[in-house]
Image (cartoon, grey):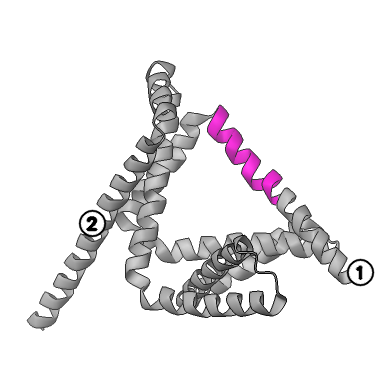
């Protein structure tokens, strides 16, 4: 019972710590230093839009670094040791493992995301039985892992394009905030029509996906022509 109580208490404490360490400084940067935020977001977004498939291995590593940070903070709260040690150990261990095992890590990431989504859906449907929830999580994890690996290339293109589109759109928006004469009308327009931001993101994501597919097809043609020449 004591272990269960500690585990239950560790999750919210870990979430609060992560929010204080990572979320709040970023929100502060977005609100108070929009130009700096834009200079970070726009180049990052352009890189993912143009070369997302080439960079996805780094994206997988960063995702597992994030998972390691969460796991490290939770472990530190549960076992009552220094959170900095937990953050460093968790992020380094999972980040290092994800680099050589990136395909397996990609599958695990997809399985984990689908399992989390299906658990949320189960909660909304009122499913509370432990056996049922475990079965849903296991099946969703296995299906998500398999689909993520089988549909690896298109999923990577879509996800990296969406990440790039979000970064570019948010960065461009923050860039306009640095000049109130320009940012004021844009802010009012997006507040009146929030769907404009979504449309801009989707257009950028579509363009990025098309460019990545074209880039990948060009590389295939080069390889084929070089093979024919040999």
Q: Judge from the rendering whether residue 63 lies leftward or rightward of residue 227; answer left or right.
A: right
As drawn, 59 above or below 41: below
Image-quadrant location for residue 190: top left
As drawn, 40 above or below 10: above
Seen as rendered, the residue at the extreme front is: 126
**Residue 197: image location, x then y, percent:** 38, 38
**Residue 76: image location, x then y, percent:** 79, 62
List the residue tagged with mark 1: 2
Seen as rendered, the residue at the extreme bottom is: 230
Q: Earlier in the sequence, mark 2 or mark 1?
A: 1
The residue at 60%/75% (across/down) is: 137
Image-quadrant location for residue 28: top right
In the foreground, 46 or 130 = 130
List the residue tagged with mark 2: 210
Q: Which residues are magenta?
A: 18-32
Q: Is residue 86 visible?
A: no
As drawn, 125 above or below 24: below
In the foreground, 127 or 201 = 127
Q: Judge from the rendering whether residue 44 lies leftward or rightward of residue 114; answer left or right.
A: left
Q: Is residue 93 magenta?
A: no
Residue 85's label in the rendered image is none
């Amino acid at each position: 019972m004591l272990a269960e109580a500690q585990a239950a208490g560790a999750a919210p404490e870990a979430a609060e710590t992560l929010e204080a360490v990572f979320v709040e400084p970023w929100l502060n940067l977005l609100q108070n230093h929009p130009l700096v935020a834009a200079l970070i977001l726009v180049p990052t977004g352009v890189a993912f839009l143009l070369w997302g498939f080439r960079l996805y291995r780094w994206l997988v590593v960063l995702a597992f670094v994030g998972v390691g940070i969460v796991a490290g903070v939770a472990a530190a709260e549960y076992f009552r040791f220094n959170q900095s040690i937990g953050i460093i150990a968790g992020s380094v261990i999972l980040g290092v493992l994800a680099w050589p095992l990136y395909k397996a890590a990609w599958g695990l990431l997809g399985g984990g995301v689908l399992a989390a989504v299906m658990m949320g859906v189960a909660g909304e449907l009122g499913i509370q039985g432990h056996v049922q929830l475990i079965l849903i999580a296991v099946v969703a994890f296995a299906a998500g892992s398999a689909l993520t690996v089988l549909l690896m290339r298109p999923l990577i293109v879509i996800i990296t394009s969406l990440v790039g589109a979000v970064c570019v759109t948010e960065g461009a928006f923050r860039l306009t905030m640095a000049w109130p004469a320009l940012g004021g009308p844009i802010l009012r327009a997006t507040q009146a029509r929030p769907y404009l931001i979504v449309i801009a993101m989707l257009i950028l994501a579509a363009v990025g996906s098309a460019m990545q597919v074209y880039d990948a097809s060009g590389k295939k043609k080069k390889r084929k022509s070089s093979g024919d020449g040999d």
